[in-house]
Amino acid sequence: MEQTKTPRSRQKIMLPETLALRKMREILNLDRKQAAILVEKNAKQLEKIENGFVELTPALVSQFIKNYGFSIANFELLVEGRVEQVKRNLSPKAKKVIENNKLRRSYKKNITKEVRTLQVLRKLKGVTQYQASFLCKYHKTAIGHIENGRVEIPSSRIQHIVKSYGFTMKDFEYHMKSERFVTDIQDECMEIIRGLSEEKLKAVYPLLTTF
C-alpha cells in the first residue's frame, strides 16, 4: 500500500483538529492498526499524527475525513467538542448503510465461487471482514454478510470490492479460474505444520526457509 509522507513537527501541538481526528477513529471503534489501513498510513505515523507530532495540513485533514467516511459538518462538530452530537448524527445513518448501498439481505445462504474469490482476495490483502467493510465504505458487518452468502452481489459490486482491496479484475478472474484457492492451500499447509512433532518440524524448517 502506497503511503504518503506527512510533514513532522518537532514540538507536540494538540490542536482541536488533532483531537477531532482521533475522535473520528474512536467513534468508528477502530484501533490504530485498523484505522491506518483506511487513511493509508502505518500505525506509527497515525500515532504521531494523533499525538500532535505531525503538522496538520488541509490536505491531510481532508484525507482523514474522506477515508473515515465523515462529513465536513460532523468533523467541525468534533473540533468544537460536540462528540455526542456527532454520534447521534451517525447512528441512524449507520443502520441504513447496507440499504443505501443496495446490498439486499437474503435468508438463504448462497456462497458462490465469486463470493469465495472475494474472500480469497480479502485474506491476501491481510484484513479482517470488519476492516474490509470500512475499506469498501460499507457498514461494518456488510463483508461478513457477503462472504456468508447472505447478500446478493451484482458485477458492479464485485468490481467495487475488488478495487477497494487494491486488486484488479484480472486478479479476480485469475483466482476464479484456479482449481484450488491459494488461501485454502495455505490453510492446509499450516494445519500440516501444526501437526508435526518438534523433531519433524526442525527437519522441515531448513527446507521451508529456502523458498
Image (spheres, rainbow, N blue to C red):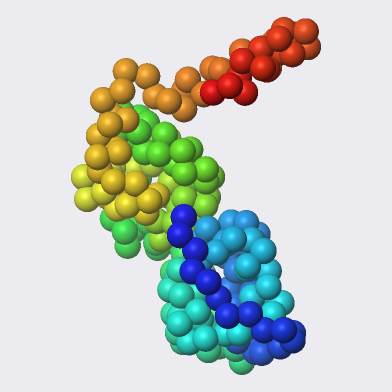
Q: Is residue 73 visible?
A: yes
Tell me the quarter of the picture where residue 205 sits.
top right
Task: Please provide percent x and percent y for residue 61.
Answer: 51, 81
Q: Residue furthest front?
A: 210
Residue at left 39%, top 24%?
181
Which of 111 and 37 lies nearest the eye of the viewer?
Answer: 37
Q: Is residue 190 above or below residue 24?
A: above
Task: Please provide percent x and percent y for residue 17.
Answer: 60, 87
Which of 101 and 119 lies nearest the eye of the viewer?
Answer: 119
On screen, residue 39 versus residue 33, left or right, reads left
Q: Is residue 159 above or below residue 190?
A: below
Q: Residue furthest right?
A: 198
Which of 192 and 152 lies nearest the eye of the viewer?
Answer: 192
Residue at left 74%, top 13%?
202
Residue at left 47%, top 22%?
184
- Quarter of the image that includes the C terminus: top right
Q: Residue furthest left?
A: 155
Q: Is residue 149 above or below residue 134?
A: above
Which of 126 and 72 lies nearest the eye of the viewer?
Answer: 126
Task: Please provide percent x and percent y for residue 208.
Answer: 60, 19
Residue at left 47%, top 44%?
125
Task: Please provide percent x and percent y for residue 126.
Answer: 52, 43
On screen, residue 109 versus residue 79, left or right, reads left
Q: Is residue 81 visible?
A: no
Count the marks.
Answer: 0
